[in-house]
């Protein structure tokens, strides 16, 4: 599978288990098979060590930043990882003011000097290109409510990193069915 898609990267965040959600939806759980992905990138708010361990079992490389509700405080505020030809920045997003604002996100992207910036906190999945850079938000894999929205669509992102291209697959659980949208970003 990985040979066809390049390096596979699971991007998740904002689980809020058990405080705001009971667990990951079953249809998503069946898709998250150990050793199919090479990396897990998490924007934080897993909340518990058990949830961390569950994601850690999926791939050999787990990268996480601290969310504003995580019990474990040893996660960094930001992290930069190199995957293939791409420098990817990871930050929870509660530090970005206003939350999810494109210009504020672009400032953080420049500060971290990354090709792709991944944030969470808003619980809304987003895939945007801004000033020639790629900005991703996996949303909440559990559909946990947020301060901004009570009706959150459960979602996560799978990246296929191959050469100077990243293919982004956004998975959403809508009306009991999994919907997938695809977009591509090419490093110039």
Image (tube, rainbow, N blue to C red):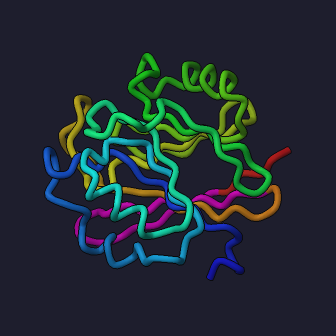
Q: Is residue 30 left or right of residue 63?
A: left
Name which residue lies at 56% across and 26% down.
Answer: 105
Specify whether residue 167 is painted magenta: yes
Residue 119's place in the image compared with 52, above or below, is above
Position of 41 with respect to 32 (left or right) is right
* Residue ranking furthest to the front: 74
Q: Is residue 96 above or below residue 4?
A: above
**Which residue sits furthest right?**
188
The x and y percentages for residue 97 are 44, 17
x, y percent for residue 35: 52, 77
Magenta residues span 165-183
Q: Main secondary structure of the magenta part?
A: strand
Residue closer to the observer: 159 or 65: 65
Q: Position of residue 95 (x, y in %)?
A: 43, 21
Q: Quadrant of residue 145?
A: top left
Which quadrant would the C terminus be assigned to in this image? top right
Q: What quarter of the picture does the N terminus occupy?
A: bottom right
Using the image, determine if residue 188 lies above or below residue 181: above
Res 58 quadrant in image:
bottom left
Residue shown at 71%/49% (left/top)? 82
Residue 56 in picture, x, y percent from top left: 42, 62
Choose between 140 and 84: the one closer to the eye.
84
Query: Total number of numbered labels?
Result: 0
Q: Residue at x 53, y 32 (%)?
A: 78
**Residue sitting at x 41%, y 69%:** 57
Query: Is residue 116 a member of the stretch shown in magenta?
Result: no
């Amino acid at each position: 599978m990985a040979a066809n898609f390049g390096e596979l990267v699971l991007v998740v965040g904002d689980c809020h288990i058990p405080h705001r959600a009971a667990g990951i939806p079953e249809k998503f759980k069946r898709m998250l098979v150990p050793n199919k992905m090479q990396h897990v990138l998490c924007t934080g708010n897993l909340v518990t060590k058990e949830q961390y361990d569950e994601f850690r079992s999926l791939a050999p490389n787990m990268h996480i930043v601290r969310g504003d509700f995580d019990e474990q405080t040893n996660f960094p505020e930001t992290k930069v990882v190199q995957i293939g030809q791409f420098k990817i920045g990871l930050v929870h997003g509660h530090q970005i003011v206003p939350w999810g604002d494109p210009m504020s996100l672009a400032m953080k992207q420049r500060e971290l000097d990354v090709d792709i910036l991944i944030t969470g906190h808003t619980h809304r999945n987003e895939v945007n290109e801004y000033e020639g850079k790629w900005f991703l938000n996996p949303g909440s894999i559990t559909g946990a409510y947020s301060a901004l929205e009570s009706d959150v669509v459960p979602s996560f992102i799978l990246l296929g990193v191959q050469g100077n291209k990243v293919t982004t697959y956004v998975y959403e659980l809508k009306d009991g069915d999994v919907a997938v949208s695809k977009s591509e970003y090419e490093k110039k």
